Amino acid sequence: MATFISVPLKKSSEVDLVKPLSKFVTATYPPGEEQAEHLRAVEELNKLRKSALGRPLDKHESSLEILLRYYDQLCAIEPKFPFPELCLTFTWKDAFDKGSLFGGSVKLALASVGYEKTCVLFNVGALASQIASEQNLDDDEGLKAAAKFYQLASGAFAHIKNTVLSALNREPTMDISPETVGTLSQIMLSQAQEVFVLKATADKMKDAIIAKLANQAADYYGDAFKQCQYKENLPKYFYFQEVLPVLAAKHCMMQATAEMYQSALANQKKKFGEEIARLQHATELVKTAASRYDEYVNVKDLSDKINRALTAAKKDNDFIYHDRVPEVKDLEHIGKASLVKATAVQAPLSQKFTDLFEKMVPMAVQQSVSAANSKKADTVNRLIGSLREATNLCNGVLASLNLPAALEDLSGDSVPQSILEKSRAVIQQGGLQSIEQLIKDLPELLQRNREILDESLKMLNDEETTDNELRAKFNQRWARTPSGDLYKPLRAEGNNFRSILDKAVQADQVVKERYNSHCEMIALLCKPENELSSAIPSANPAKTLQGSEVVNVLRAQLAQLDEVKREREVLEGEIKSVTFDMTTKFLTALAQDGAINEEALTSGELDTRYGAHTQRVQQNLRRQEELLSQIQVSHQEFSALKQSNSEANNREEVLKKLASAHDSYIEISSNIKEGTKFYNDLTEILLKFQNKCSDIVFARKTERDELLKDLQQSIAREPSAPSFNVPSYQSNTPAPVPAAGGPTPAPRTVFQQQPQAKPQPPARPPPPNIPTQAASASVPVSNPVPPSSANHPPVAPTSGPSQAQGPPYPSYQGYPGYYQMPMAYNPYAYGQFNMPCVPYQAQGQVGYPGAPPVQQPYPYPQQQQQQQPPQQQPYYPQQ
């Protein structure tokens, strides 16, 4: 009775997890102890997969523990690695499809960790069913273990049924389809219930309880049988064709068991007629199982037990009770009691599981941290940008007013000290040469980045073109995600990079135009002091203004403005030095709420960290605005007091241009250095983008090759043409019946020759002439020769020849006069047939028979024997 069903394991192809995962770790985490620890964890994960899937597993709990650990680890790392970007392709074969002669078994390759989890969980359920089937059911511990593993298997298959479509986002292979795994889950649950029936029987529990348990098991088996019987795809598998009779037999046996124990309960209640009716029904059920499914289950013990109980019940009722035996349809329905439940799949399934990547934060947290860092950078750039913009505005206003050079140039013939300081600053930073070299390098950096971006997008375009061509060729057979849909995020990222490069080109052009407009004055600042002094026009002295109140007010206002600038530099440094990490807050939010409200958390943290700095920046800007207004008013008074003449105006104009050239030089130099750093940083980013494109294209090519191979195998398995009837004239013609007493020739395979005319062989020399005396001395050919001691060779009869035994392939009949070897000749059949020995005769010997008609088959000899030898069977199969 104890025939239990187990599920075969799926087989997976080898996958290298080290390369793509290590690449992500090295790109995401800086070199150090944390990166090294993650790289070691990647190696351990690869070893764990090989242990779980790369070798045959024993039907033992230790092997199941390895599978559970690997499944738990997949659940743990799924949110921590960007698997869609890594393009890791997992290939699994169908567990039930055994393939065919011309092609391997059905398999599916997907770049999805959800697909890997689904297949690993299938193997968890399969191995659990195999371990349960190996348990000793005569032992209490074995019964408990079997029930536990069957419920685990049922839970694993049920979990796949509910999650497989969302995990794969495409049609799965038949073994993990919702219909198949749903049926397997029901089968495992039925067997777990049957184990509880066996345990209840062994524990000698009450008859009513055992009857309810058995009736529930029969109900479970009936549901499983219906699922196998009415699902269109399941019977295609030979596995389910074998399972179907076992389920039907188990349904009958469990129902018979329930009736037997319910009859015992009826006996206790003095309902002897009901007892007999239930035992009779149980007998019919057992007979049905024995007659239809005897090769799958053993019902002898149960049948004997029921028959003994029925015989005793009938005897007691006939002699003592005389109770009426009711019809089966009138019997009260037996109750049901279920003690089994599919084990819920909740990671971790293994009690010994430890996350190899425990210190790595999930991708949701990483993405939230990245977004928070981006918002932090925007805040810092906005504050610092406003400060630098205010500084540029201040320098521009002062340069337009020729301050502070106008206050220092009251003599009218010497170079102002501020101009000399600006000149030294320009020379110290490299002057024109450094700026020209930086401007010259920009186009090369730009071109390098454009080439990297163009090459990356070209790889995507080429692969997408190939995919579209194959999709148009195979139509619905090309069942994989279109490259155009898969590459949308990468193309959006590439378009973003192209837009950034276009904006950078425009910014470079603005910087170049500004440099060209100030190039002459910057070159003047780079000259020695004596050349600079001679280049600046002289003017009449204005010494009367040196002690005036207006000059003193202007100098005081300029000193306050310098103080505002210094405060601004300190404030900029403080803003840059602010650091904070949102990882802990995001992890806490993810653990508590299951989701991260990144925007709210980041905004609150930024307000806390930069609120005070924002207020100080606003105060600094307002203070500068007030001072510039005051300086402009004071400068108007100062200009009115100065003597107005053309020389003074020319000198002041040159000094303004020199001051503006210094400010422009500082800004242009800063802009070009930032541009150079931008292009270099963008090169690293584009190289990572190129690697990402290369990886996904390589993965797609691998997937394409696998799919092409599968398509070739499926095409080879398909029939080349529909079945058709062979014309009657092409069928084998029956051999003529030989004369009585002769041996029956074996049937000959007849091959029709092709209708095309073949070239005729070259002419052969005629056969040797046999003298008339030799011909007359030969044996007459009118009648067959009986066997004699002379052992003469057989002679072909002159009557219609019988069909000869020939080889199962076409053969050349020979030129006229060519003698074929008699097909009865078989050197390995010596002694099996009572045939005369045929001596070898050279060509032209007298004793050899005359030539038969041209291209006529040589017939079997007709032997005058009363008993025919057994017919020799041909070696090749006959058509």
Image (cartoon, rainbow, N blue to C red):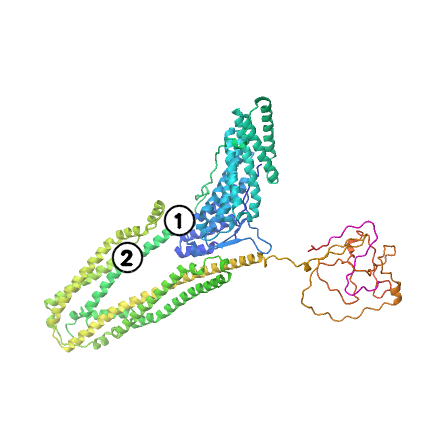
- Give the amino acid type for the residue marked by disc 1 in the picture: Lys
Q: Which residue does the numbered mark 1 point to in the structure image?
A: 359
Can residue 644 be seen in the rendering of this structure?
Answer: yes
| Residue 302 drawn at (x, y percent) | 59, 33
Residue sitting nearer the eye, 305 or 195: 305
SS category of the residue bearing label 2: helix
68 is higher (above) or lower (below) than 427: above
Q: Which residue does the numbered mark 2 point to in the structure image?
A: 379
Residue sitting nearer the eye, 740 or 659: 740
| Residue 570 drawn at (x, y percent) | 24, 58
Residue sitting nearer the eye, 495 or 77: 495
Q: For the point 85% across and 67% down, which residue is it?
A: 770
| Residue 597 drawn at (x, y percent) | 32, 50
- Give the amino acid type for the residue marked by disc 2 in the picture: Thr
Residue sitting nearer the eye, 367 or 525: 367
Is residue 711 part of the magenta span, yes or no?
Answer: no
Q: For the point 44% across and 56% down, which residue is it?
A: 86
Left or right of residue 406, residue 463 in this image: right
Q: For the point 50% across and 31% down, which residue is it?
A: 332
Can residue 140 be seen in the rendering of this structure?
Answer: no
Q: Residues in magenta?
A: 849-873
- How far apart marks 1 and 2 lie (CA) works out to 29 Å
Q: What predominant SS class does the magenta segment belong to? A: loop
The residue mark sitting in front, 1 or 2, is 2
